[in-house]
């Protein structure tokens, strides 16, 4: 039996045709360019995932994560919050660009909602089974989508800032926040405010704090020096990915 299962997995892997296609879309007068990633060999509609980028904009990291999700069977759209061609390549410019949206949550919500609307237009999207995930700035954005009252099943934040600019009034999506326990950029007071907010609005939420982990613990390119406040942690990366998979299994059943 084990041999048969392994053979089936091998056959399915061989048949998988992961396709990545840039998609232009609009938010107001702004032109955005996201990335649609899916297994083209699988017919029909399927659960779909919105992926939100880190502070340097949509790039190779998000493409890789989107491919990983597509290989799990999901239809994926990696959104573009900043705009077509706006991809900061250094921390100073990235912080400035991310700051525009962190200080204007209405604009941030419009941009992420535009991405959600585009995902819903893609042929394989099951509009009743949608989730959003994000990393760092993207985690903050995914949580903001939930705070907007978006009618989706779930949101996963990986080492995103969790504190709201303005607390939510209603949250429909289930929430999983994956947090580095030693993250200097998301201090305990902010985490406590997030917990209080979730309780106040009656959200279905879960926060997992990974020990010995700082900011960017899922980012393979973040180095391994925790003293810098940003570092990759292989255990936390793998554990949080598994937590996401379990979360999806629950909400997409």
Image: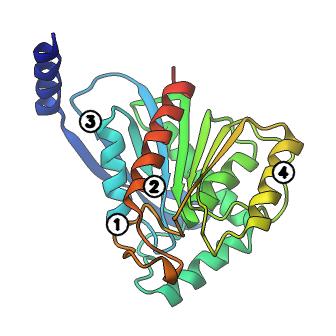
- Image quadrant where residue 10 sits: top left
Reading the image, the residue beneath label 4 is: 197
The image shows residue 251 at horizontal and vertical percentages of 57, 27
| Alpha carbons under labels 1 and 3: distance apart | 24 Å
Reading the image, the residue beneath label 1 is: 220
- Image quadrant where residue 179 sits: bottom right
Q: Along the polypeptide, which appears first: circle 2 or circle 1?
A: 1
Residue located at (41% from left, 26% from top)? 46
Mark 3 neighbour class, 10 Å CA radius: few under 14, some 14 to 19, many 20 or more: many
CB atoms at circles 1 and 3 under 8 Å apart? no
| Alpha carbons under labels 2 and 1: distance apart | 12 Å
Reading the image, the residue beneath label 2 is: 236
Mark 2 or 1: in front is 2
Under circle 3, the secondary element is strand
| Alpha carbons under labels 4 and 3: distance apart | 38 Å
Under circle 1, the secondary element is loop
Which of 189/117 is in front?
189
| Relative to 200, 122 lies left or right | left
Reading the image, the residue beneath label 3 is: 39
Mark 3 or 2: in front is 2
The image shows residue 172 at horizontal and vertical percentages of 74, 35
Under circle 2, the secondary element is helix
């Amino acid at each position: 039996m084990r041999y048969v299962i392994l053979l089936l997995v091998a056959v399915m892997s061989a048949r998988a045709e992961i396709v990545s296609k840039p998609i232009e879309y609009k938010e107001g007068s702004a032109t955005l360019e996201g990335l649609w990633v899916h297994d083209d060999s699988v017919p029909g509609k399927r659960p779909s995932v919105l992926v939100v980028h880190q502070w340097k904009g949509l790039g190779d990291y998000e493409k890789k994560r989107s491919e990983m999700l597509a290989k799990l069977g999901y239809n994926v759209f990696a959104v573009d919050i900043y705009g077509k061609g706006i991809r900061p390549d250094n921390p100073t410019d990235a912080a400035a660009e991310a700051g525009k949206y962190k200080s204007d949550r209405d604009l941030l919500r419009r941009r992420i909602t535009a991405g959600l609307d585009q995902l819903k237009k893609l042929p394989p999207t099951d509009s009743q089974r949608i989730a959003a995930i994000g990393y760092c700035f993207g985690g903050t954005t995914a949580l903001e989508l939930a705070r907007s009252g978006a009618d989706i099943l779930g949101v996963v934040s990986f080492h995103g800032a969790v504190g709201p600019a303005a607390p939510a009034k209603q949250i429909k999506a289930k929430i999983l926040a994956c947090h580095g326990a030693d993250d200097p950029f998301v201090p305990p007071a902010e985490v406590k405010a997030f917990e209080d907010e979730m309780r106040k609005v009656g959200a279905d939420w879960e926060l997992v704090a990974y020990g010995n982990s700082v900011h960017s613990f899922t980012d393979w390119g973040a180095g391994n020096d925790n003293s810098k406040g940003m570092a990759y942690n292989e255990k936390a990366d793998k554990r949080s990915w598994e937590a996401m998979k379990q979360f999806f299994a629950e909400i997409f059943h």
